[in-house]
Image (cartoon, coloured by chain):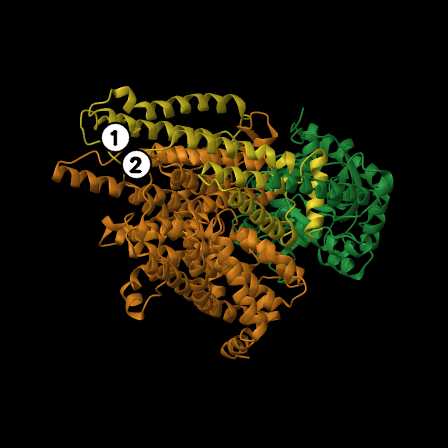
Chain colours: A orange, B yellow, C green
Amino acid sequence: MSELELFWIGLTNAFSPFNFMMMLTGLTIGVLAGALPGITMLNAIVLVLPFTYSMDIVPSLLLMTAVYGGGIFGGSITGILFNIPGDPMNVPATWEGYALNRKGHVAKALGVAIMGSALGGFLSCLVMTLVSPPFAKIALSFSSAEYFAVVFLGLVSVVVINTKSMGSSLICLFLGMLLGTIGIDDVYGAARFTFGSRLMETGINFTIVLIGLFAIGEVLDQLCERDKVTDPGLKERPKVHLMTPREIWALKGPLLRGFGTGTLIGAIPGAGATVASFVSYGVERQVSKKPEEFGKGSWEGLNSTSSAINASVGGAMIPLLTLGIPGSGATAVMMGAFLLHGIQPGPLLFTKDPASVYTIFSGMLLCNIVMILAGWICAKFFSELMRVPENIMGAFIIVFCFVGAYALRNDSSDLWYMALFGIGGYFMRRYSLPVPPLVLGVILGPLAERYFLTTMIGANNDISVFFTRPVSAAIIVVSIGMFFWPMLQSRLNKRRTGKSCAAA
Amino acid sequence: MSSPSARAGAHPPWIKIMAGPIFFLAFGLIGYFYADGSIDPAPPGQLGAGFWPKMCIIGILMAAVLKAAELFRCIGKAEAEGGACKEMDTRKLVLMMLLIVVVVPAISFVGFPIATVLFIGSFLWLAGARKLWVLSLTSIIGTTFLIYIFVKVVYLPLPKGDFFFEDITLAIYRALFIM
Amino acid sequence: MKKHGLKWVGFALVLALMLGASTAFCQEKYPSRPIDFICTWGVGGGSDQMVRMLAKLTEPFLGVPLPVSNKPGASGNSGTTDLLAAKADGYTIANYIADTLATIPTGQARYKMDDIEWIVRTQNMPSFLFVKTDGPFKDIQALLKATQENPGKIKMAGLGFGTIDDITLRYLAGKGHKMTLVPNPNPGERYASVLGGHNEVLYEQAGDIRQYLDAKQLKPVMVFAESRFPAFPDVPCSKELGFNIFLPQFRCVIAKKGVPAEHIKTLVAAFEKAMQTPEWKKFNEDQYADPASYMGGDQFKAWVAGEMNSMEKLMKEFGIIK
């Protein structure tokens, strides 16, 4: 059978009413879970896993990929509407989206996020369908040195994004990385900064840092403001404007760049969507003709990061399906689902069961189109929530944060961290310390350490290994360039205008 | 770096401006020596478990110096951050923070359902709601909804509480046909 | 106000009634409510699959569901610590594996072997050394020769320092076959590093990398056992090569010490029945586990103690612990 034929069979399979229903259900669950602070996409995938036991492999895989795709996007909705990103990858979309919201463009911002995610995801699934095996080969040629380089790029891009104060950004980034080292270390089994307590041994989960700092910090900040003037514009019932083809065409550059970075970075194991999100945003800012708009409501930034996060889904599925290597938590759960159905993802899958593979492929393509519908419905739903009184919203956001923190590993000691970071989030706002570098430090710090140590052990502690391998050398050089270029630029600008002291 | 100074006058004393970097420098130095003393030494020929945290701390120290330099250029100039800071209701803020801290042991001790009803109720009260029916209805209906989803549908083993609170929680679950 | 007061009294009464009813209900028989099954490793991994399969198959024999919750971290000790913090009423159980057992002698675990009620051994799986099929090493002899000629040059992907992987490697080094351990706790990355040719050797159980074995991308060159493994009759075992180190990976179910003996008996019987179902047998075969994996009660406890003693002995020998 030719691939086209297989693809056609797959498409007709995917269109069966049951499969279609699974997709829509999965997307809705995913978007809802992604949007609720504390309940992450990973929680949602674990949640639907038991329901797939009794299903066939195809609908269960479609259900899970739908949750995955929807969950990655969902956090952008609450980010844009309430300034509370659901998951770490939605942070850049929150910056731009919430800024656009404040300027009164909430309907279009939601539309751009939905369409950006759907189109980015669709294109990356196309890549997955067409060139999975060669793409997988490239991914396999990367060693831990390249993994380190990519994570390094992610770390640099978050520092570069905040130009207000490089010093504050770096302090927070390193502080986050230091927080990430707390607990028993993976490689040596050594206790670090545990102060002899069990509470500290398990370490700090990044989701707690994220939702604590963002969600609880935001609630405290908004509810405790004295003499607050409620903005009447925000109380109106918001609409969702999807993009017209003309608008898509106008933003094709950011869309394609986001899709490219997302797919590539998604295929590399580790922080997938999160790194993709920040890197694409950072890159977009460098190439943009209007970099001054970034942080104050940039359509390009929003579109690029939305496209990148969902493009990473297709990227992450490639090593899973072709090699049987799960690169992230979400794909690990999916791998578990495959195995529970007695199917080994990996090189033999394509020869043994091509019909299933192509059904999954076409289903995922379809999924990204259905996502426009699901995203629209959920965005509408959450927009309605904006009319719920602020104090009730605040109370439930905090409860969701606590449940989410507990659900991460069913551990009530995580609740202490949640309270701590929630209060810390308020103080960081108060003393204008940027939150995103800290969160990204907690997420990427441990990955960077592991890749760095593994590479160094394999290379007999010779640091030149990062520069002798062409791919890792190229990425590291680009990162360093990204780091110093804005400094030089601003130095030059300042000299020209004679202004200094942007902010503290 | 805090804004009260900006409000107080155009030329705040340097110690106030530099408080942030100084804090992080001190934090970094103490942290470095603590890390050096508390983490297992590296096996011969390897970087060991202490390498990365120490590198992070050195990063903090360097960043603090950079921040100090950034701020140094601002001393004597009146164009500080200005106006970004909101007036906060300090009493409300402190009470809410206290509530967020207190609810943590409460969840373990009295169980999730009871703690959540109490938390939502008191949080709404702090946030300005005063009508008894709003407080009780919101907290009870909200909590019922939450435990129904998380315990019944998702099988999340939320804390049931200690001593007889565990029995109460189980009784609540039974009454709601969750178990 | 009076009206409210009355309502509260009514509420309290209802609550008291329910409470009384529930406590009476609780003491009837074991198990009368769902048993929390803690998986001490992350979702999707080998332990997680085992726990979920076992929970599903055991449910009919116990008559109550066994909801699985994952609590990964600290080599399986986060979940274990939680089990030990719960009530010893038989309503909380957990899985346990050899890698976690290795943390008792190192002192990383905060409990002793006797704090645990050892219920059943569910899977016993020997570890193998794997190499790339199209890589430089044809068989174990070629690999051993290379390690002798270039000590430390060959890289082996394993879990981490101080683990069973590390102990085995140090044992081999002591016999003149020194390899460098490249630790990576993430299984996917570990396999990718060998498939991509970045590390030459992989230390793993066969069930975890079945897809690469079926696709002939990796091949086993040696099994750490006293006899050859039935599924790979051509692969020499460590004993015939003169390496007396075995340390199989095992997975089992545990409870907190102090659970009433009759409850333990109920659990052992239920698990034994579950492990006789064809589904379980197929699952075990797919995982390349020893067909005679089942071991329950006191016999199992004695076996675990033996395993731990040999680990402790080797760790002392290699200076991992004092």
Classify residue A116 as left or right of residue C251.
Answer: left
Q: Camera-side residue: C94 or B63? A: C94
Which of the 4 image quadrants contains residue A199? top right
Instruction: Please say if B120 is above or below C189.
Output: above
For disc 2, the marked residue is A166
For disc 1, the marked residue is B70
Q: Circle 1 — which element?
A: helix
> Where residue A318 sits: x, y (%)?
50, 61
Instruction: Please say if A460 is above or below B143.
Output: above
Q: Camera-side residue: A444 or A68? A: A68
Q: Circle 2 — which element?
A: helix
Instruction: Please say if A389 is above or below B57.
Output: below
Q: Chain of mark 1?
A: B
> Where residue C17 sits: x, y (%)?
75, 43
Which of the 4 image quadrants contains residue C53? bottom right
Q: Chain of mark 2?
A: A
> Where residue B25 sits: x, y (%)?
37, 23
Whether residue B74 is visible, yes or no, is: yes
The amino acid type, in three-letter code, at marker 1 is Glu
Q: Are marks 1 and 2 in contact (CB under 8 Å)?
A: yes
Mark 2 crowdedness (10 Å alpha carbons): few <14, some 14-19, many ≥20: some
In the image, what residue occupies the spot 39% across and 32% down?
Answer: A427
Classify residue A354 as left or right of residue A428.
Answer: right
Q: Camera-side residue: A307 or A398? A: A398
In the image, what residue occupies the spot 34% across and 55% down?
Answer: A302
Classify residue A240 as left or right of residue B44.
Answer: left
| Most distant residue in the front direction | C2
